[in-house]
Image (tube, rainbow, N blue to C red):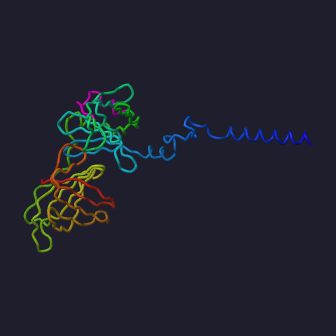
Amino acid sequence: MRFSTLIAAAALLLGACGSREDAPAAAPNGTSEARSPSSSPTNTASAAAARWDLQSSGEGVALALQAPEGRATIRLFCPSAQSRLLVNVPGFRPIGSEERLSFGSGGAVVALVADTGGDRQRGGVSGTGAVPGNLAALVGNPLSASYGAQSSGPHPAPPQALSRAFVAACSEGAAPARPPVSPPLAASSPCLTQGSERLQVRPLRAIGTEPFWNARIEGRCVTYSHPEDQAGTRVWTRFTPATGGGTWSGALGGRRFELRTRAQPGCSDGMSDRSYPIAVDLLVGGERRSGCAEPG
């Protein structure tokens, strides 16, 4: 009987040891070591879903890595005719004593001057400097940026077609050509007539980013363009005037198209330092977008 009791006690002790070995290792603070978020399937899938996008306007050209939710993870921007490069990382926190943002790929790194107060227009921190002579090598490989102890990347290399177009635009000091501008409308143009009424609507040029889009407003006609349709598609709308702006309502591709304007001095396109006098809200393809406009 005593022998049986000893065997049972030994079995219990072995079971207890096995359960302790199978348990997660305790972290120094007494909690169980959690799986690193960066290795979780969800974050891995999100990283894989990020994509590079080339955005251009009359203000310059940008190469941006778009997260799945539409926000930019890192953005490279060359203003028109300035031979200058701006690198913006929205996730960086400004540091009052850190004036350098480093950007590059592998062993090729350039140092840009960072605003210690952060970038109020784009968010995060931006670094600026002359367009480097090795820009093609920098954007032809996985990209990283660092600011103080903060880092972003390495991010996957942009597709070659996008990186080549970006480098060419930056090297020329100008953005890719805009879509051709339509000749001035004659006074008898149908775009200037709505029913029996002659419209008194000044021409406007509207732009937006993330994703990039462009619209030319002439009377009740709106020519809407984007990178996949640079020539633009004319949308016949009904114009409804409003104090400080108006609404253009129609259909594009069988879906509702609506563009609204309102006075907003200092409107920013989110990609350049330029400000506009008019803000724009756009509904197209079931998506709502925002931008700015000016007479033109």
Residue at point 33%, 59% (across, down):
287
Percent position of residue 112, x then y? 27, 30
Question: Residue 271 appears in which quarter of the rendering?
Answer: top left
Residue 231 higher or lower than 187, as above or below: above
Question: Residue 199 appears in which quarter of the rendering?
Answer: bottom left
Question: On the rendered structure, is 4 left or right of 44?
Answer: right
Foreground residue among 73 and 264: 264
Which residue of the protein is positioned furthest toward the bottom in this rendering?
A: 196
Which residue of the protein is positioned furthest toward the right in this rendering?
A: 1
Percent position of residue 23, x then y? 65, 41
Foreground residue among 268 and 173: 268
Foreground residue among 214 and 281: 281
- Quarter in which the N terminus is drawn: top right
Residue at point 17%, 55% (across, down):
264
So how many labels did they put on this image? 0
**Is 17 included in the stretch rendered in magenta?**
no
Which residue of the protein is positioned furthest toward the top in this rendering?
A: 107
Part of the protein shown in magenta: 127-140
Residue 227 higher or lower than 125, as above or below: below
Foreground residue among 260 and 239: 260
Percent position of residue 68, x then y? 40, 49
Percent position of residue 221, x then y? 18, 63
Which residue of the protein is positioned furthest toward the left in this rendering?
A: 187
Residue 154 higher or lower than 221, as above or below: above
Question: On the rendered structure, is 289 left or right of 143?
Answer: left
Question: On the rendered structure, is 102 left or right of 222?
Answer: right
